Amino acid sequence: MSAGDLIRVFYGGVAIITGGASGIGRAFGEALAARGCEVVLADLQIDLAEEVAVGIRASGGEAMAVELDVVNYKDVLRVVQQTAERCGRLDYMFNNAGIVIFGEASDYEVQDWDRSIDVNLRGVIHGVDAAYRVMLKQGFGHIVNTASIAGLIPWTMEIGYSATKHAVVGLTNTLRAEAGHAGIRVSALCPGLVRTPIIYGGKYGRWIRDYPKDQVNKLMESTRPFPVEKFVQVALKQIARNKAIIVIPSTYRVLWRIYRISPLLGIGVARMLFHGMRKQLKQFES
């Protein structure tokens, strides 16, 4: 194996980031580019992705934007293969695109379940499948799947999101067990509440019930979301160390630990938080 056959952390590397136009994806793109990594920002919001890429290039980094719907496997495969062919390598695949549909389980319709599964689970599967093929051939690479603290513990008021993120954690851990022999790293990124558009619904997610947007935003702000720029700085350090499960901010590890020690207690805590949130939201109903 030559020096060119090793993963580059992060200088001189190549990274694809789905959902790269905003939120965590955008912050990863900017931070990686600042570290000398060439980034491909893949997103349905192509105009916004282009703006981010222009800003990165203006700062001296290497970036390009591509329009991508992660639900379409052929398009994901095309972006991955074209990037690997153009750059001669693929060091990182950040399967980051996701949506949240907020509401109680009783609010959900089947299309809400389908949309959550399509984007949050199938989208990750598509990215994993396409990138893993390339990385197996080159003998190195790091797949980073954005799950959530909602993929480690019960997380109410977003049941479709929690279900799919639990699946992403399971997928990631299993792939890590299988991929290690081939020199491929795999990590599950499990953010707590981070200040990004997704916690307010984002462009493609939504609140099922029609709550006043300003009141919902105020409620979400009251949880003191973690700054996204700080989140990414911490995450990249742990990705460089090849951590398997990355939980940020660290305070959420307490909830994860409670659930691992006593699932019944963890569910009890989730139930308490659910009733608290429900009571607050009831105040917004007309």
Image (spheres, helix red, strand yellow):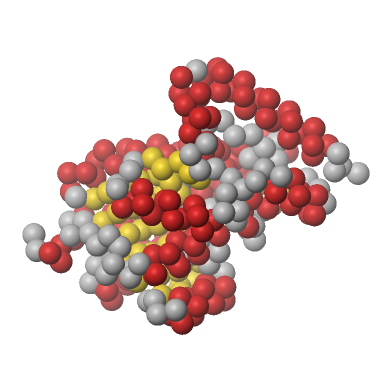
Instruction: Please tell me which residue is depicted at 8% across the width and 59% down the height of the picture.
Output: 1
Q: Position of residue 119 (x, y in %)?
A: 52, 52
Which residue in the rendered view is the most extreme toward the left? 1
Above or below 29: residue 154: above
Which residue in the rendered view is the most extreme toward the bottom? 58
Q: Nearer the viewer, residue 62 or 78?
A: 62
Q: Nearer the viewer, residue 150 or 113?
A: 150
Residue 194 lies left or right of residue 245; in this view the side is: right
Instruction: Please tell me which residue is depicted at 60% across the width and 56% down the height of the picture.
Output: 196
Q: How many numbered marks have been drawn onto this rendered protein structure? A: 0
Q: Position of residue 177 (x, y in %)?
A: 26, 38
Q: Mark yes or no: residue 74 visible.
A: no
Q: Mark yes or no: residue 256 visible.
A: yes
Instruction: Please tell me which residue is depicted at 43% across the width and 51% down the height of the picture.
Output: 234
Q: Quadrant of residue 62?
A: bottom left
Above or below 7: residue 112: above
Q: If the image is split into quadrants, where does the C terminus sit?
A: top right
Instruction: Please tell me which residue is depicted at 76% across the width and 33% down the height of the picture.
Output: 278
Which residue in the rendered view is the most extreme toward the right? 286
Q: Position of residue 92 (x, y in %)?
A: 32, 59
Residue 169 lies left or right of residue 4; in this view the side is: right
Residue 8 lies left or right of residue 275; in this view the side is: left
Q: Position of residue 162 (x, y in %)?
A: 55, 38
